[in-house]
Structure formats: structure tokens, C-alpha cells
Amino acid sequence: MDCLFCKIIAGEIPSTKVYEDETVYAFRDISPQAPEHILIIPKLHIPSPAHIDETNSAVIAHIFEVAAKLAKELGFVNGYRMVANCGEDGGQTVGHLHFHMLAGRLLAWPPG
Ligand code: AMP
Ligand code: ZN
């Protein structure tokens, strides 16, 4: 499948890995929008948040468990933000579900 993040999971495209287990992969965003910017993705190819359903949603809970664990390990003591962009209006540019984990500075709300 011609999917950038599937290729990253397969090791065909290099990435800076911060976490991996059987169902989840996490790596540093190539264009960080905060001092800490990690992408947490399911190994299963799910195209977007709009494609989450009862057959694949267990990995989403696991992604948030991994995020909490990474926050402790990496010292995000002031907090962090999890963002999943969906579709064109949501600003999604890569068609493999991913959660941005942003930390290390005060983040504006609402987003632009
Ligand atoms: P989104 O715009 O929500 O689809 O997010 C896609 C993210 O993937 C962006 O923040 C990009 O900087 C990031 N990205 C694109 N290519 C790579 C790559 N090869 N390695 C790491 N992050 C990437
Ligand atoms: Zn994929």
C-alpha cells in the first residue's frame, strides 16, 4: 500500500522512534510545532478518525494509554495536547490515522 506511515512502520522510511509495541508506533514529527511533537499511530492502516468503528477502536484507547506513559517518561509535567486532524477541513495531510502529541510550551486555544 502506498502509505507514508505504513512505510515508516515497516522501516522502509526512516523515523525517530520513541515507542513501539504490537499495535502502536510512536515517532518524532519531522516538522515539530512544539518543543516536543510526537506522532502516535496504530500499526493497522486506518485512513482517518472518520474510519474508527467498533472493529478497530480498541487501539485508540491503547494510544491514549501510551501517550500517558510517554508523558511520564519524557517529563511532560505541565501537560500536553493530543490532536487528530480529520479530512480536508481538519487539516489532515497523511491518510493514516495519527495522533499528534504536543508538549513543551503553552499551546493556544482555540487552534487556527
Ligand atoms: P496531519 O497534517 O495532521 O496529517 O499531520 C501529518 C504530520 O506528519 C505533519 O505534522 C508532518 O510534519 C508529519 N510528517 C510527514 N512526513 C513525515 C515523516 N517522514 N516523518 C515524520 N513526520 C512526518
Ligand atoms: Zn498506512
Image (cartoon, rainbow, N blue to C red):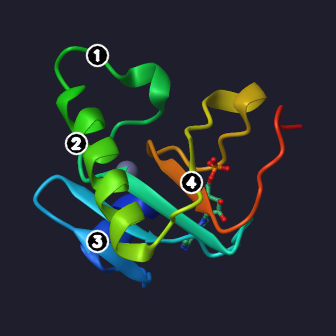
What residue is pinned by disc 3? 19
Q: In which image quadrant can residue 88 be found? A: top right
Amino acid type at image mark 4:
Gly
Nearer the viewer's eye, disc 4 or disc 3? 4
Ligand 2 within 8 A of label 1's CB? no
- Say whether disc 2 or disc 1 marks the residue closer to the N-terminus: 1
Mark 2 or 4 closer to N-term? 2
Where's residue 23, x and y in %?
Answer: 16, 52
Read off the residue under disc 4: 79
Which of the two labelled residues, at mark 4 and mark 1, occupies the earlier sequence position?
A: 1
Element type at mark 2: helix
Q: Are marks 2 and 4 in contact (CB under 8 Å)?
A: no
Element at badge 1?
loop
Q: In front: mark 1 or mark 3?
A: 3
The disc, 2 or 3, on the residue closer to the chain's N-terminal end is: 3
> Which mark's residue is nearer the viewer, 2 or 4?
4
**Are the residues at dot 4 and dot 3 in contact (C-beta closer than 8 Å)?**
no
Give x and y (percent) for residue 56: 21, 27
Image check: 13 left or right of 88? left
**Residue 62, label in figure:** 2
Which residue is found at the position 22% from the left and 69% from the top? 20
Image height of 57 relative to 78, above or below:
above
Mark 4–mark 1 Cα distance, whole angstroms, equals 28 Å
Q: Which residue is mark 1?
A: 53
